[in-house]
Amino acid sequence: MRNYIALALTSLAACTNAPAKETAASTPSAVPTVPVPAIDVNEVDSLIQRVVAEKRLVGLSVGVMQDGKVVFAKGYGFRSLEPKLPVTPTTMFGIGSVTKQFTCSSALLLEQEGKLSMNDHVAKYFPSATRANDVTLMELGQHVSGYRDYYPLDFVVREMAKPEPTDTVIARYATRPLDFEPGSRWSYSNTNFLILGKAIEAASGKSVGEFMHERIFTPIGMTRTAFDRIPNDSNTAKGYTSYALADPTTVAPEAQGWIGAAGAIWSTPTDLLAWDLALIDGKVLSPASYSKLTTPRVLTDGRLTTYGCGLGVQKTGNAVILSHGGGIAGVVTQNIVIPATRSGIVTLANADFAATGEITSALIAKLTPHVDVPTIAGPTALEAAKAFLTSVEQGKVDRSTLGDDFNALLTDEHLAKDRSSLAANGKVTDVAVRQTVERGGMEVAIVEYKVGKTLARTAMYRSPDGKIQQFLINRQ
């Protein structure tokens, strides 16, 4: 399933001469909560409305949690175009691969009870799989098994349109030669999670869906969450796609048996935020199990992934961010958690072309602690970056917004060259602030964007008075 991890979490940490160190995301009980200013919900609402209109999204549901409280939950657009029915905060969407953190957590709960071990080999549950005695359940959850992914493309292929028993899907893909030696590479594979689901069923004596309802959904109070779509529930979102920029059209979902423990949950932002809070507050897993869920895997050559068990883990600025996305037929989702501020962001969109990165980037910047970063007068870093890039594209910079040295550097000739260079590559789009740090008493915002098809990156320096002291445009 595509779009599976937010914030480019599939990348590997750079190798160093020292061995890679595994670092788990600490629970709030271990690390004091870091306060951040309350978000402006009207500002958030305006941003989302603009993105929905500009990206021509069909429907979108957004939830935001700050300091353990849901401060924003709103639906936009339509859950169905024919008939036209609006998205509400209780509209259920397929969450795709966000399901994977629930699957890993279910396995870890069973491990706590001694009913399975994450060190069990696949042979115990699916003995016909290739090298089943060499791959563990933990390696399945960490995507380092070597089993071929059955769903790597961005559309439902012909075989996935036909119902199949999950065992048949596993046998078709997990009995092929491994793509690599177990533990030597990170490669996203939905096949891993179908196998992990079979282990959960064998150890619990229940279906994966029954186990999740009994042990996770009901105790947390996730009343609008289900494993598989609820039949005859009218407040669920239809999935849409678009062909060659045409108007949205409905898309047929994956057939029964294909997504299961890899991506079959349906939910709402409010329910997912309840899950996020229970998870980071230690109400789901023991500290040892939470550590396994959120500790990135070290590969056999010493490289460190940015993925725990069914969950992406990345340090951005001054905080660890737990994140996963989902992409099934007609759906794109994101679930992002910032334990240090007990904050979370959920976006659920019912179009497979939905682009919500601008929304999540802006919210992450507001909900991430900025320890030692000075307060900056004037607009936010994102607004300042967008305004400056627009002014360069137009060749007219408001020099009163620039520091003296940068103003001297950015001569009219320099500005003309910058404008020409941007124009040659295309329009600036997808501007996002990835993190902010402090240097020299200034805010340093790491800004990423596209110029046409070219990825670009800037370290924008601003002094407390709000003036831009540096904004150099570089290829990423």
Image (spheres, rainbow, N blue to C red):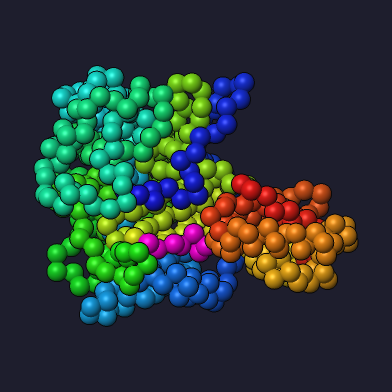
Q: Residue at x 44, y 38 (%)?
A: 307
Q: Is residue 356 magenta?
A: yes
**Residue 84 in the image, given as x and y percentages of width and height:** 27, 80
Q: Residue at x 56, y 59 (%)?
A: 452
**Residue 76 in the image, given as x and y percentages of width and height:** 39, 74
Which of the 4 image quadrants contains residue 106?
top left
In-image side of 245 versus 431 (left or right) = left
Q: Does residue 237 sit above or below 475 in this rendering? A: below
Whether residue 414 appears in this view of the structure is yes
In-image side of 407 versus 448 (left or right) = right
Whether residue 111 appears in this view of the structure is no
Q: Residue at x 50, y 74 (%)?
A: 50
Q: Residue at x 20, y 53 (%)?
A: 254
**Residue 283 in the image, given as x and y percentages of width and height:** 38, 48
Q: Is residue 211 magenta?
A: no
Which of the 4 image quadrants contains residue 141?
top left
Q: Which one is in front, 285 or 39?
A: 39
Q: Does residue 276 sit above or below 57 in this rendering? A: above
Per the rendered image, the range of residues in magenta is: 353-360
**Residue 58 in the image, given as x and y percentages of width and height:** 35, 71
Looking at the image, the residue that sits furthest to the bottom is: 84
Q: Does residue 165 sit above or below 123 in this rendering? A: below
